[in-house]
Amino acid sequence: MNENSEQRSFIDYCREFMDWEAAGGIVLIGATLLALVAANSPWSEWYDALLTTHAEVRIGTFAIDKPLLLWINDGLMAVFFFLVGLEIKREILEGELSSPSQVVLPAVGAVGGMAVPALIYTWMNHGDPVAMSGWAIPVATDIAFALGILSLLGDRVPRGLKVFLLTLAIFDDLGAILVIALFYTSNLSLAALGVAALAGLGLFLMNRRGIASIAAYFFVGMILWVSMLKSGVHATLAGVLAAFAIPIVTADGRSPLKQLEHDLHPSVAFAILPIFAFANAGISFETMTLEMLMHPVPLGITLGLILGNQVGIMSLVAITVKLGFAKLPDRTGWRDIYGVSVLCGVGFTMSLFISSLAFGQSGGALGVDNRIGILGGSLIAALMGYGLLWFSLPAAEAGRNDSRAPERNVNTP
C-alpha cells in the first residue's frame, strides 16, 4: 500500500515537472551537458562511432542509407518542424497572429533580430567564402529556452511581455524556415521535386475535401518527406508543409491539428530535441585554444547572438513605437523589452540545426568548431537576459495572475 502510494507520488511529480514551462529547457541543458561529457571522456570514440553508425531502409532498389546523425537531423527534426508548423497555423487562424494589433511590434522586432545578427556575422567573415555559409546561424531564437527562462521569473512577468516574446518567436520560426528553404538547398533533382509537388498537392486536396484521417495525412506526408529528402531541398521542410495541410476543425467539430499538437508535445520536448542536442552539441575541448575561440566564425556567431539580437530588436521596436505605429505591451517598460531582446540571443537548437546544414556537425574545412560560438553566445545571452529581467520586473503582487501566456508547446530556434 505504501509502495503504491510512493509510486503514485513519483508519477505525479514527473507529470508536474513535464507540465512546467521550463522543463523542456532543463532537459535540453541536461542532454547538452551529457554530450559535452561524452565528447571529452574516455568514451568519446564510442560517442563518435554511435553518431556515424549507418542505418539503411531499403525497398527493392530504392534505399535511404544515412549515418545516425543525419537520421536525427533529417528525420526526427522533421517531426519538430511539423509541430512548429502546426503551432504557426493555429496562431494564424485563431491565436496571436490573428490579431493585427498584437502583430506589428513583435514582427518588426523579429526582422531586426534576424537582420542585425546576420550583418554582424557577415562583417566578420566576408572575406572567407567557406565561412560565409554560416551567415544564418545567429539569426534564430530558441523559443523553448527563451520562454523557459522567462517562466523562471513566475508571476513577475506580465502577460503582455510573454505575448510579445511568443509572437516574435513565431515570426522568427517563419523566417528560419524561409532561410532554410531558400539558402540551404543543393543538387536539386527535378524528378524528386515533381513527386514532392504531387504529394503536396495531394495534402492540399485532402484538406479541401475535409478528410480528417491522421493516418492518411501521415502516409502522404511520408511520401513528401522522402521525395524532399531525395530532391536536395532539406527534408525537414516537409514537416512544415504537411502541418499546414492538417485541418484545424472538421465537419464533426473535432480538431485534428490541436490533437496532434497535444500528442506530439511530450515526444518533441522530452525526446526529439534532447536527442538532437545530444547528437549535435558534443564539442571536444582537448585541442581548443584561445586562437580558436577568437576565430571569426565562432566569434561572429557569439557577437551576432549577444549583440545582434538586442541591437536589432531594440532599435526597430523603438523606431516603430516612436513613429506611433505600435505601442509597448501593457505593464511593460523599455527595460523589460531590452531584457527580452537580450534573451532572444539564446539560439541553441535552431542555430545548431542551421550550423549542421552550413558546415556539417563541427565545421569541417573551417578548422574550427563553430558550435563553440553557439553554446557560448547562447549561455551568455541566457544569463544576461535573466539578470536584466530579474532587476527590471517588479516583485510579484499577491493574488496577481495576469502572467499566463497563450500555450506554446515547443522552441522553436
Image: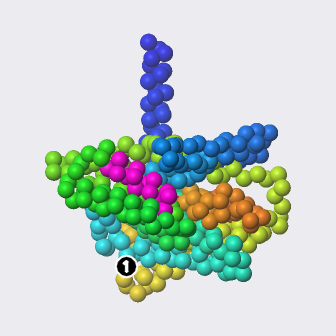
Q: Is residue 265 visible?
A: yes
Give how far across and how far down residue 324 sits, in percent. Answer: 37, 85
Amino acid type at circle 1 is: Ala
Return the residue found at the far top: 1
- What's the residue at 44%, 77% (across, down)? 108
Among the 4 quarters of the image, the one containing residue 353: bottom right
Relative side of 124 to 250, left or right: right
Q: Main secondary structure of the magenta part?
A: helix
Q: How is the image coloured?
A: rainbow
Give how far across and how far down residue 191 sits, in percent. Answer: 44, 63
- What's the residue at 25%, 59% (across, down)? 205
Residue 82 colored in magenta in the image: no
Q: Nearer the viewer, residue 370 or 231?
A: 231
- What's the residue at 81%, 58% (across, down)? 288
Q: Which of the image's four quarters has the N terminus?
A: top left
Mark 1 surroundings within 10 Å by alpha-carbon count, few (fewer than 14), some (14 through 19), many (20 or more): some
Return the residue found at the far bottom: 323
Q: Can you say whether 19 is above or below 169 in the image?
A: above
Among the 4 quarters of the image, the one containing residue 12: top left
| Residue bounds of the magenta highlight | 217-231
Query: What residue did someone put label 1 on?
Result: 326
- What's the residue at 30%, 62% (across, down)? 201
Q: Is residue 147 visible?
A: no
Q: Nearer the viewer, residue 80 or 380?
A: 80
Please, what secondary structure does the residue beneath circle 1 have? Answer: loop
Give how far across and how far down residue 142 sits, in percent. Answer: 53, 59
Q: Nearer the viewer, residue 277 or 319?
A: 277
Q: Can you say whether 60 is above or below 95 in the image?
A: above
Give how far across and how far down residue 228 sits, in percent. Answer: 46, 59
Q: Can you say whether 177 is above or below 119 in the image?
A: above
Relative side of 259 to 268, left or right: left
Q: Nearer the viewer, residue 152 or 196?
A: 196
